[in-house]
Image (tube, rainbow, N blue to C red):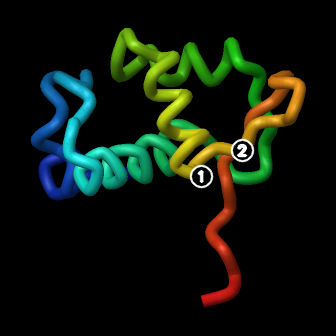
Amino acid sequence: MTEPSTHPVAALFSHGRLTAIPRKAARREQLLTHLAETLFEGGREYTEAEVNDALRTVHEDCSALRRYLVEGGRLTRRRDGSGYRRAEPSAAG
């Protein structure tokens, strides 16, 4: 696990909890990448309840964080909303 004191988003947390969702897009993107990498395993499907539970460990507004993660391409969601997966980095580059 990444040491919180050295991670670029460490200042956004206090006692393991996210103090606020950043308004600036670049900072929010850093946060979303961090959350996707630390809260969700690659290759595993999660229910919406599991995603919410994981996000609530850092912030109460799990629906906003979930929406940002999907819109930002960090999580993919089944069309029917029944499952979520951490998006894998593109192999093309």
Tag shown at residue 82:
none
Q: Which residue is mark 2?
A: 76
Return the x and y of residue 73 as percentages of the image width and height: 59, 52
Q: Nearer the viewer, residue 38 or 87?
A: 87
Instruction: Residue 56: name its quadrant.
Output: top left
Return the x and y of residue 23 as percentages of the image width and height: 21, 37
CB contact under 8 Å: marks 2 and 1: yes
Left or right, residue 45 beside residue 88: right
Under circle 1, the secondary element is loop
Q: Which residue is mark 1?
A: 73
Residue that appears at 78% across and 51% down: 43
Circle 1 packing at 10 Å, graded few (<14), some (14-19), many (20+), is some
Residue that appears at 53% across and 22% down: 54
Left or right, residue 14 beside residue 49: left
Q: Nearer the viewer, residue 53 or 74?
A: 74
Residue that appears at 52% across and 37% down: 39
Under circle 2, the secondary element is strand
Q: Marks 2/1: CA distance?
A: 7 Å
Question: Label 1 sits on what residue type?
Answer: Gly
